[in-house]
Image (cartoon, rainbow, N blue to C red):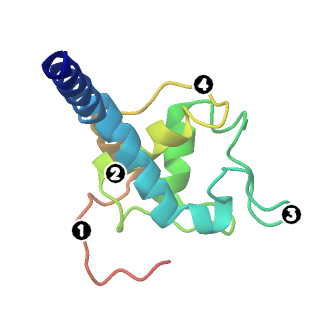
Amino acid sequence: MKEVLIKAAMVLVAAFAAAASSPVRAQEMDGKALFLKNCAACHQPTGKGIPGAFPALAGSKFVQGKGAEVAGVLLKGRGGMPDFSDSLSDRDIATVLTFVRSNWGNKADGLSEADIGSLRTTLGVDPFGNSVMSNKH
């Protein structure tokens, strides 16, 4: 009986480990980490922003709208928000936007690295160069 319980526990642990390491789950975790590192100071970890200072992303019609418009803000900045074109790769921008567009009640499609690369070209934003010296924010 003890052997059966141990084997069952091992199967459950393996199943949870596989689920946690799936590409979709990994991207969600990466998106959350990127959001916490780059966005949460202003937009708050809950995505609710700070009224009058930083807009809420949670439940935002803009965030759930056209992906190119949302990505354009990260690539070019807007108002008091800096652009992230030099500090986040196309993959990172796609990953964080996919996270934001699918959390806190938001239900919008994600974006791909190719979407962001294409938008960089359309907007005339230089390709990501991974500049270590960037200090925009």
The residue most toward the front is 1
Discs 4, 2 touching: Cβ within 8 Å? no
Q: Amino acid at mark 1?
A: Asn
- Residue annotated with mark 1: 130
The answer to whether the residue labelled 3 contacts the one labelled 4, judged by CB atoms less than 8 Å apart, is: no
Q: Which residue is most to the right?
A: 52
Residue at 48% from the left image edge and 64% from the top image edge: 38
Depth check, mark 1 against mark 4: the one in front is 4
Q: Quadrant of residue 14?
A: top left
Q: Earlier in the sequence, mark 2 or mark 3?
A: 3
Real-space Cα separation, disc 1 to disc 2, in angstroms: 11 Å
Q: Which residue is mark 2?
A: 92
Query: Which labelled disc corresponds to residue 107?
Result: 4
Camera-nearest label, 3 or 1: 3
98 versus 5 height, above or below:
below
Residue lying at 74% horizontally and 62% vertically, measured from the top left: 54
Q: Toward the viewer: 128 or 44?
A: 44
Residue receiving disc 3: 52
Measuring from the top left, give residue 20's x and y in whole percent: 30, 34
